[in-house]
Amino acid sequence: MKVSYHGHSVVKIETNGKTILIDPFITGNGQTDLRVENESPDFIVLTHGHDDHIGDTIVLAKKKNALVIANNEIAHYLSWQGLNTHPLHIGGSREFEFGKVKLTQAFHGSALMNPEKQEIIYLGMPTGVLLFIEGKTIYHAGDTGLFSDMKLIGERHPIDLAFLPIGDNFTMGPEDAAVAAEFLKAKTVVPIHYNTFPPIKQDPQTFINLLKENNGKIMNAGDVIEL
């Protein structure tokens, strides 16, 4: 299985001939190496409803009727846009063709904003996501602050690879993310959600230096980890 990082919170998983994209924010993402015209996922997993996470989901999913997996509100909203969706919610899990997906809690927001109409479309609770694929466990925290139940997530689901936001301002900063890594006890921890916009500018090495277990890995856009 190949797991690659593509800037901001975009993660790609390639397993058994299938491609899964998490939070495919490509258009407008100055940190990514991906191009919408080159991507054709089989599955898309969304952590929450902000536009820098839903991103290019509609265009990408329509290419070959990809299944979009997200919380109940996002799944229904996108089904109204003609997409093939499967609704989950926090604590719930489901087996799919590639493996199992379980949504976890996250502390953040989840909405689409229309500045022209000064309208906010509520899209349910934000989530993190656990993926159980080929005997490995991957945790994508989504956008979140630090919370103590990360200890339980790590204890109940030994994690091989964790993606944690470090950008501060909207999510955890490096210091809190380092505590999260200690709670989760993942074998490898990768910082995400930083340097895309001025308010979340960070040096990822600061986060790596704070890790007590020396288990951090900075991934540039396009870098791959084999699990």
Image (cartoon, rainbow, N blue to C red):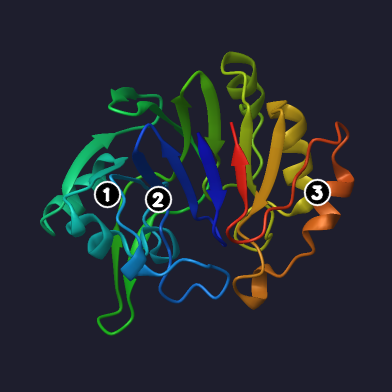
Outermost residue to the top: 156
Element marked by disc 3: helix
**What is the quadrant of residue 92 in the picture?**
top left
Q: Is 215 drawn above or below residue 40 in the view shown?
A: above
Q: Is 178 drawn above or below residue 116 in the view shown?
A: above
Q: Position of residue 85 (x, y in %)?
A: 19, 43
Q: Is 55 drawn above or below residue 2 in the view shown?
A: below
Which of the labelled discs sits on residue 74, or is there none? 1
On the rendered structure, is 217 left or right of 23? right
* Circles 1, 2 touching at the beta carbon (< 8 Å): yes
**Residue at horizontal 68 percent and vertical 45 percent from the top:** 190
On the rendered structure, is 134 left or right of 179? left
Cα separation between marks 2 and 3: 23 Å
Name the amino acid type tagged 2. Answer: His
**Residue at horizontal 54 percent and vertical 59 percent from the top:** 6
**What is the quadrant of residue 196 in the picture?**
bottom right
Q: Mark 1 or mark 2: which comes first in sequence?
A: 2
Q: Position of residue 37 (x, y in %)?
A: 32, 70
**Residue at horizontal 66 percent and vertical 68 percent from the top:** 200
Name the amino acid type tagged 3. Answer: Glu
Element marked by disc 2: loop
* Circles 3, 1 touching at the beta carbon (< 8 Å): no
Q: Position of residue 79 (x, y in %)?
A: 14, 50
Residue linked to disc 2: 48
Name the amino acid type tagged 1. Answer: Ile
Residue neighbourhood size for the residue with mark 2, other residues' Cα within 10 Å, grouped as few (<14), some (14–19), many (≥20): many
On the rendered structure, is 69 left or right of 195? left
On the rendered structure, is 99 left or right of 4? left
Q: Quadrant of the C terminus?
A: top right
